[in-house]
Image: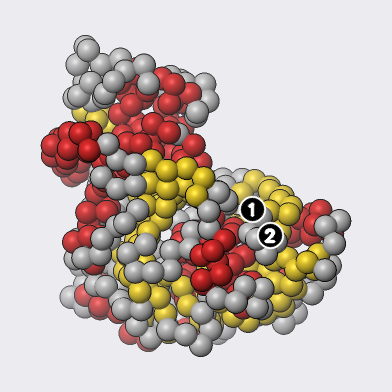
């Protein structure tokens, strides 16, 4: 009988459950969207109970669908939207407020106050990252300050905190009736509360942010025993957990220093493996945990997170009505040969890596009467490529590692014009794998490694197969190299506009 792995990919807009076989092929897949709540400008929330219900439903359906394939599901792996913050009642399992999503900007004033403190340098020194509202720690502090009695209840041990994988594992393993309260090193690293060298909660960071230790889950390796799911009709060991972007790095088999992947979705997230040595950043990328196998050293990565990539195409479609569907942007952009001198900086709510300027605002620069909707469409696509270059240059400055190729995944990789632009603007080959569901696949790989379905990471590397490659065109790469300062000028204008 074949052995399978169930992967749950709990994302920003939906939850997917996929059963994979040993070859990394999908046996069954189910998906369900959840509501997005926008109660105030800049606030983004999810209902954790809806997400838990969707997880149960999709996982059970995927398991039933796979039952006809004469295979045994031997492990469960979870990948999740990172930084999204949930606080719930230990006794009842009910969240005390809706989940605060990673895109949420409500902690801006809190971050400003924390950054101004004379001891603020401890956050970068211990956690590997600057103080930013992007991470879960400030969101947790906001909940403790804003929800009546939350702090006193947390100090008494009545409340639990977690990112989405922690919330799901606790519920899958029994919830109020003995649920396991754990996280993995990758998700813990996104809180600003963990020492990235020891991979343990840091008492001084907890004191800095004002977080009671009783709230926090136990930190475990990404690959190893996390608990047993008893809520899906059959007991399944939970043996893998990774933040979604680290899961994509794992699913793309980027196991050697220098190997990198970029996921192009609503935003874009580029991670480069830096090995078992932590690289301290100076140029705007993030030092983060890539993964850890039980009993082995932690592997680290540099990350560049871009808030707006595919969301800019959605804006062109829904906000301006210039296209009817997202794929139409490539057709429209191909009606012209270049951007006509037009640049779009999509800082809808500030800029993330490598600038980290929350005050920046989106702009369209270089407009003349010559510019058509085709030029604007091309500029929209090129904005994603320019932002990718910003991140890659920052990482190179920090790590000194060469980028032999960029492995890509996500919905935008079906856009051939964009992928060729990325190859040209980086002067580096861009490669897309055969299996596009790299986040789910990474979660499955992590879980399967722990139970011996795959012997080691080299077996996973042999599973990786290329489906498409875009090689840089030397003349175009040189032209874009000369054009890059114009993009940088547009970014500076975006920052200055918001600052004024």
Residue 283: quadrant of the picture = bottom left
Q: Position of residue 399 (x, y in %)?
A: 23, 67
* 358 shown above or below 280: above
Q: Position of residue 500 (x, y in %)?
A: 16, 40
- Give the residue drawn at x 51%, y 45%: 467
- Give the residue drawn at x 26%, y 23%: 338
- Give the residue drawn at x 47%, y 85%: 296
* 8 shown above or below 451: above
Q: Is residue 226 left or right of residue 301?
A: right
- For disc 2, the marked residue is 20
Q: Is residue 38 left or right of residue 196?
A: right
User: Could you tell me if residue 217 is visible in this image?
Assistant: no
**Residue toward you, 12 or 408:** 408
Q: Is residue 456 left or right of residue 263?
A: right
Name the mark on residue 15: 1
Q: Position of residue 328 (x, y in %)?
A: 48, 23
Name the mark on residue 500: none
* 61 shown above or below 320: below
- Give the residue drawn at x 43%, y 26%: 330
Residue 131: quadrant of the picture = bottom left
Kindly state the secondary structure of the residue where label 1 is placed.
strand
**Residue toward you, 433 or 356:** 433
Q: CA distance from mark 2 to mark 1?
A: 16 Å
Work out whether mark 2 precedes mark 1 in sequence or the reverse, and give the earlier one: 1
Categorize mark 2 by other alpha carbons within 10 Å: few (<14), some (14-19), many (20+): many
Kindly state the secondary structure of the residue where label 2 is placed.
strand
User: Could you tell me if residue 236 is visible in this image?
Assistant: yes
List the single residue furthest toward the top: 369
């Amino acid at each position: 009988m074949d052995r399978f792995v169930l992967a749950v990919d709990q994302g920003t807009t939906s939850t997917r459950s996929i059963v994979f076989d040993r070859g990394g092929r999908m046996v069954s897949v189910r998906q369900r969207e959840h509501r997005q709540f926008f109660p105030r400008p800049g606030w983004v929330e999810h209902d954790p109970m809806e997400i838990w219900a969707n997880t149960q439903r999709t996982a059970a359906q995927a398991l039933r669908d796979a039952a006809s394939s004469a295979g045994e599901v031997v492990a469960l792996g979870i990948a999740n939207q990172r930084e999204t913050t949930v606080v719930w009642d230990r006794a009842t399992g009910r969240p005390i407020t809706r989940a605060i999503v990673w895109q949420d900007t409500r902690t801006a004033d809190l971050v400003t106050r924390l950054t101004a403190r004379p001891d603020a340098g401890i956050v970068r020194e211990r956690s590997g990252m600057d103080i930013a509202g992007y991470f879960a720690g400030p969101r947790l502090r906001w909940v403790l300050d804003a929800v009546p009695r939350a702090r006193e209840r947390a100090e008494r041990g009545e409340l639990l905190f977690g990112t989405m994988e922690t919330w799901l594992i606790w519920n899958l393993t029994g919830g109020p009736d003995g649920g396991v309260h754990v996280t993995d090193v990758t998700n813990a690293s996104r809180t600003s509360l963990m020492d990235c060298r020891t991979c343990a909660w840091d008492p001084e960071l907890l004191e800095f942010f004002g977080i009671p230790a009783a709230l926090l889950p136990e930190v475990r390796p990404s690959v190893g025993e996390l608990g047993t799911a008893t809520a899906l009709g059959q007991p399944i060991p939970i043996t893998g957990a990774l933040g979604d972007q680290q899961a994509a790095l794992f699913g793309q088999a980027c196991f050697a220093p220098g190997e990198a992947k970029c996921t192009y979705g609503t935003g874009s997230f580029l991670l480069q493996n830096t090995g078992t040595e932590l690289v301290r950043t100076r140029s705007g990328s993030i030092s983060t945990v890539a993964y850890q196998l039980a009993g082995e050293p932690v592997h680290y990565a540099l990350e560049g997170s871009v808030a707006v990539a595919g969301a800019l195409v959605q804006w062109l479609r829904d906000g301006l009505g210039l296209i009817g569907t997202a794929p139409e942007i490539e057709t429209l952009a191909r009606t012209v040969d270049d951007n006509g001198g037009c640049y779009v900086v999509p800082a809808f709510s500030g800029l993330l890596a490598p600038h980290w300027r929350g005050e920046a605002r989106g702009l369209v620069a270089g407009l003349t009467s010559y510019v058509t909707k085709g030029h604007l469409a091309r500029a929209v696509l090129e904005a994603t490529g320019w932002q990718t270059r910003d991140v890659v240059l920052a990482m190179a400055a920090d790590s000194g590692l060469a980028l032999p190729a960029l492995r890509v995944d996500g919905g935008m990789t079906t856009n051939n014009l964009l992928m060729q632009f990325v190859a040209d603007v980086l002067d580096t080959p861009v490669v897309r794998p055969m299996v596009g569901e790299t986040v789910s696949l990474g979660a499955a790989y992590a879980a399967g490694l722990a139970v011996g379905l795959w012997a080691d990471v080299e077996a996973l590397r042999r599973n990786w197969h290329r489906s498409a490659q875009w090689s840089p065109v030397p003349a175009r790469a040189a032209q874009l190299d000369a054009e890059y300062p114009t993009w940088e000028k547009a970014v500076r204008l975006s920052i200055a506009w918001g600052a004024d």
